[in-house]
Image: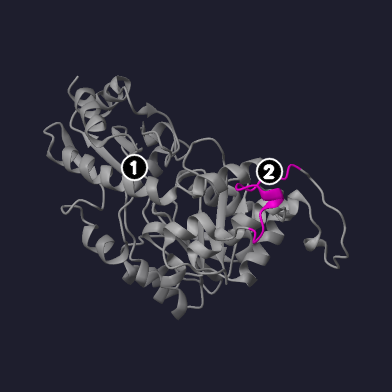
Amino acid sequence: MATRFRNVDTALIHAGEFESRVEGAVILPIFQSSTFEYTGQTSYADLRYIRLNNTPNHQVLHEKLACLEGAEAALVTGSGMAAISATLLAVLSSGDHLLAQNTLYGGTYDFLTQDFKSLGLEFGLIDATSPKTWGTHLTPQTKAIYVESVSNPLMQVADLNAVVAFARQHNLVSIIDNTFLTPLFYRPLEEGFDLVIHSATKYLNGHSDLVAGAVAGSSRWIQQINGRLMHLGGSLDPHACFLMHRGLKTLALRVRQQHATALAISDFLDRHPEVCRVYYPGLSTDKYHRRATELFDGFGGMLSFELKGGEEQARRALKRLKLAADAPSLGGVESLATRPVTTSHSGLSREAQQQQGITDGLIRFSVGIEAAEDLIDDLKQAIEG
């Protein structure tokens, strides 16, 4: 297991760094070399090569992420979907069955519904808030259970403690996507999950300038996932590693600011007469607030809301926003707003969107680090215009 630090703020800066600085450089340089000298390695996986995810830029990230997650090992990937697909394909073999939360990120849902069958894999969708129903979906071939800490885009908080207990009871590998909360607010491995995944494109990097993923867990599982990733070619290039390394160092500052602003914005929206519903577990009126308070150290910077005027008013509000861009993705220093039916969940059928409760008028808001009062003023004029 990686070296632990008393405070996460310190770990973000110093965990995983080389003991001696490269040529005295305070910041780790970009090792823009696809290949490295052979030094007697006896295993192919130990050869130094970009696709094998073991350049110096990779190694520092792996150590830092492992420290943040309290993991034996960690791995960065070429995208969040590379982390998700490589993990599932390492855990599952042809004929196996997966239990998955029924309110997933659209890309994950598409992978299950569009690719699993051709790979000889099966899945069942569960209500992750209702543990009593999970047993009915088990099969003799069920090998793993997959959930999100806070679901995208309706901010559902699964019964995560029950997921861990259920997985142990039935000898399943427990996997969680913790993109929305980051290790700052929830550390799933410390709570008993086997593997934790991130779309590092989002908060871990935080600057909307790269696509990356990450997965952490036991050394045994990370070795297997890395083996699968090597074959699929989903490695992260050194320059992207450098950018993610830079972004991680300000994670705590960014995410705490986004969390505080999200609390203020959700309160404003909850009281606005034109807003019919707000989805944010930080609200005391939210149905998942009590569970989130018990599980997490914070509620994150993502929220969604619906306007009384439905799709038409939502379209108009998005066009009127001056600070928040109408764009997909999330977790950057700039605020973003989007209708999930046109972006993150556009790949879902209309039936699937309706089943998940994703309406045409739903707006998902990724809170940036702008001043809370400025974002609230912008939302006010956009909604009322």
Q: Residue at x 28, y 35 (%)?
A: 371
Residue 193 or 248: which is nearer the viewer? 248
Residue drawn at x 17%, y 23% as measured from the top left: 384
Residue 256 in the image: x percent, y percent? 33, 49
Res. 41 visible in picture = yes
Q: Residues within 10 Å of mark 2 (few under 14, many from 20)?
A: some
212 and 109: which is toward the camera: 212
- Which element is circle 2 on? loop
- Residue at figure coordinates x 63%, y 65% from the top left: 222
Instruction: Determine whether, in the image, residue 213 is placed left or right of residue 269.
Output: right
Residues drawn in magenta: 18-32
Q: Which mark is residue 354?
A: 1
Q: Position of residue 22 (x, y in %)?
A: 70, 51
166 magenta-colored: no
- Residue 106 left/right relative to 286: right
- Residue 94 in view of the camera: no
Q: Residues within 10 Å of mark 1 (few under 14, many from 20)?
A: few
Residue tagged 2? 30
Find the distance from the CA under tag 1 to the CA under tag 2. 46 Å
Q: Is residue 80 above or below residue 164?
A: above
Looking at the rendered structure, the kind of residue marked 1 is Gln
